[in-house]
Amino acid sequence: MTSRKVVVLGTGGTIAGRANSGSDNVGYKAGEVSVADLLAAVPGMSDRLRGCELVSEQIAQIDSKDMEWSVWRALQQACLKHFADQSVAGIVITHGTDTLEETAYFLHLCLASVGQGKPVVLTCAMRPSTALTPDGPQNILDAVTVALDSRSTGVLAVCAGAVHGAQHVQKAHTYRVDAFDSGDAGPLAWVEEGSVRWCQSPLPAEENSGSAMAVHIEPWQAPRVEIVMNYAGAGDSLVNALCSMSTGAMSPLKGIVVAGTGNGTVNAAMQVSLESAASSGIQIALASRCAKGGVVRASPLPDGFRTYAGLSAVKARVRLMLELMMSATDIKDR
């Protein structure tokens, strides 16, 4: 009988970082330690696996502030490959904290119905592997615990003992080891001494977005979508500059996400420039720069504008990119 497996995909990040001193938690270089070496240094792993096999694969070795489309694509393809193996119980991804929420949401949209309910669990660290008290080993141990829990499904994130869903997870602190939360939604569960205590049911990877079909598209090319923010005195200069620079560019602008004030609001000048951009075919998504809540509209949006319930600006960008890619593919196939 083939033993069950947990696959760990490494991408670098602080969890794989090294500093010259054990007391240095910020002056380190991310992505220095291989995922295989990280796993070998986690005490208690064999007990937590309960007879399962641990398999690792290095997908990238980067600081997550440098995360890009090609690594997302490689992660998504690796998940597809490993889930094709029926013995794989779940996948863990070691990741930097800075863009973890974006990667988690990307995979949430692109792994619908893949893995037959088996989870993909992202984990991270706020301290490098060389710290006096690194948080990475415990986070990895907790992530493996969640990956093997029978109730886990979809794309999850585990950090400092808390389990978050990909739709809501966000980095909320610059330095503390419990740097993540889920805003209004709250965490799904806590990992406590090798057991998962659920307080909410995890949701499967998204099945109705249409962008999940993107797993079958070859080759993948990311449409260019930028983010602008509304603030006091912002005006229309940033939107106008983006649109003017896009003319004739090798990677023309396809979308703009606005991190609006309050309930996704923008100043009058920016509104005019966004409507002009929309009339030229650029898609506009309104989000909020607020840490909690989503954009709630009582009146219809102008043509070319959209909102995504509860999504931050960075997650709205991920969704808009995939929707634009799917739209372009639909047009091409007609």
Image: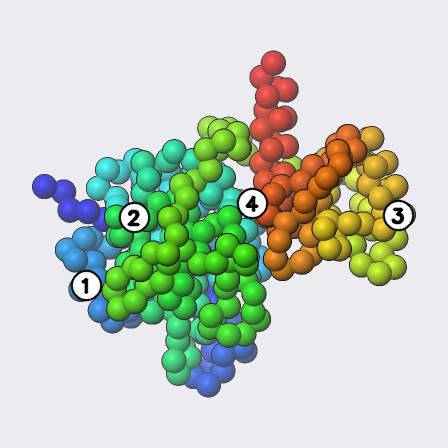
- SS at circle 4: helix
Whichever of callouts 1 and 2 sits on the residue coming sooner in the sequence is: 1
- SS at circle 2: loop
2 and 4 marks in contact (CB < 8 Å): no
Neighbours of disc 3 within 10 Å: few (<14), some (14-19), many (20+): few
183 on left or right of 5: right
- SS at circle 3: helix
Q: Amino acid at mark 3?
A: Ala
Q: CA distance from mark 2 to mark 4?
A: 30 Å
Q: Nearer the viewer, mark 3 or mark 4?
A: 3
3 and 4 marks in contact (CB < 8 Å): no
Q: CA distance from mark 1 to mark 4?
A: 34 Å
- Residue positioned 26% across, 38% down in the render: 85
Whichever of callouts 1 and 3 sits on the residue coming sooner in the sequence is: 1
Q: Is residue 317 above or below residue 138?
A: above
Residue 273 placement: quadrant: top right
Task: Residue under label 2, please give it.
Answer: 151
Q: Nearer the viewer, mark 2 or mark 4?
A: 2
Task: Residue under label 1, please give it.
Answer: 46
Q: CA distance from mark 1 to mark 3?
A: 60 Å
Residue 22 placement: quadrant: bottom left
14 on left or right of 52: right
Give how far across and how far down residue 72 sits, in percent: 50, 46
Q: Which one is in front, 247 or 201?
A: 201
53 on left or right of 265: left
Q: Amino acid at mark 4?
A: Trp
Residue 160 visible somewhere in the drawing? yes
Residue 297 placement: quadrant: top right
- Residue positioned 61% across, 57% down in the render: 292
Task: Residue under label 3, please give it.
Answer: 268
Neighbours of disc 1 within 10 Å: few (<14), some (14-19), many (20+): few
Q: Amino acid at mark 2?
A: Arg
